[in-house]
Amino acid sequence: MVADQIPNSVQTLILLAWNLANSSLFCILPMAELINFTHSPISDFHEMQSSVTADSLAYSSSIDDFIAYLDDALAATSPDENQDELESVRIKRRKFESDEETEESTSEVCTHPGSFGDMCIRCGQKLDGESGVTFAYIHKGLRLHHEEISRLRNTDANKKLYLMLDLDHTLLNSTHLAHLNTQELHLISQPDSLGGSLFKLDKMHMMTKLRPFVRTFLREASEMFDMYIYTMGDRPYALEMAKLLDPQGKYFNAKVISQDDGTQKHQKGLDIVLGQESAVVILDDTEQAWVKHKDNLILMERYHFFGSSCRQFGLNCKSLAELKSDEDEAEGALNKILKVLKQVHYKFFDELKEDIAERDVRQILKSVRREVLGGCVIVFSRICHGALPSLRKMAEQLGATCLMELDSSVTHVVATDAGTEKARWAVKEKRFLVHPQWIVAANYFWEKQPEENFVLKKMQ
């Protein structure tokens, strides 16, 4: 789409919103919210014409009031108004700018911070060529230059961090109706049997089950984080899942990123997120999707409600649907991780003393992880050589000390065979003898697990 193909009303809205959001009277509006209203039906500005004045803006209590004001104005418009009123908006905007801007700022040449089609979003000039990063998930045709992205990230002053949320196996589980096995077919005729968390999507020939505790999780997390959906699924699927998770549009709005929006194939990146990397937390079940951002990642235990999900990952076990069971809300992954997020948010804003620009959520995540197995001294026995390095690394990241040989400081022997010399020593010396899953579970839940749930018993 090029500038002369964009309706005049949309062009005017973009220029008006961008310049208003950057005036001295306002804190910076996150771009995802700034551009959201361009999704609304655009027609006329009859109400806005009599309202966009210095007085109506100067006494706005917050940028959220301004967004609501624009949304109301757009919603009230009718499609038959002529361009005279649009020109009136432009004239009033110019007068407002001339009253507020200093002589120095008015003499500056536009740096073209971004484009919509081939039109500068600030001055409206037609631009040659493309540069910067595409933000199509906010609005098709929107590009922002790297300098502008950096400016927006550096000026967001609300007391929120950013949270990237994967969909499949993290917040929900989906399957094609054709992939339901005989033990799951009863779900088709009883979609309401699971308390409003199971959905049959006829148009997509799919069934989706929301993870237990997800609605409470989203409500409480939204108070601390600016939340994005970030999925490798296609856009129609992502938007449909967003409707199920957020039917009233309170949490995500335009912040839904799908596989078509990324800048790297088969990878997820933070270059298309309008938040500092040092303030972003990621929840995802696939570590390999975030090669450049592993320090921001909280790895989620996968949610396998349907049998097709178990088969996809080569698991030789029955699914929750086949067992006619589900995760326990109080002990499930989302409840556990919500506690971690609250801890991270508190440390970032209330505990750290350095300048907020110097704070880094990645360092906080590392410090919180090191507390999980802090004080544990581990020796491994009869662990597969291929699995040992990653298991040792995981334990050390959780704060444990790993030794090669036994000594009096050892608190845990982690083994797969209770008959080894080290395992027998643990029993004799009354130390914990546990299965490697004890470490894996601690890694997923970010808390030390009861050893009695992972006791390694001698085979008969």
Image (cartoon, grey):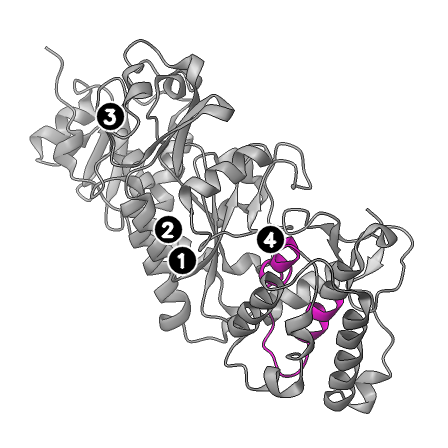
Q: Is residue 100 magenta?
A: no
- Report the span colored magenta: 15-41
Secondary structure beneath disc 3?
A: strand
Q: Residue at x 34, y 26 (%)?
A: 304
- Residue 188 drawn at (x, y percent): 33, 19
Residue 222, disc: 1
Judge the density around disc 1: few (<14), some (14-19), many (≥20) Cα neighbours within 10 Å.
some
Secondary structure beneath disc 1?
A: loop
What amino acid is at disc 1?
Ser
Query: In the image shown, does 27 or 7 lie closer to the viewer?
Result: 7
Q: Is residue 249 above or below residue 111?
A: above
Q: CA distance from mark 2 to mark 3?
A: 38 Å
Circle 2 residue: 218
Q: CA distance from mark 3 to mark 4?
A: 42 Å
Residue 273, disc: 4
**Which mark's residue is nearer the viewer, 4 or 2?**
2
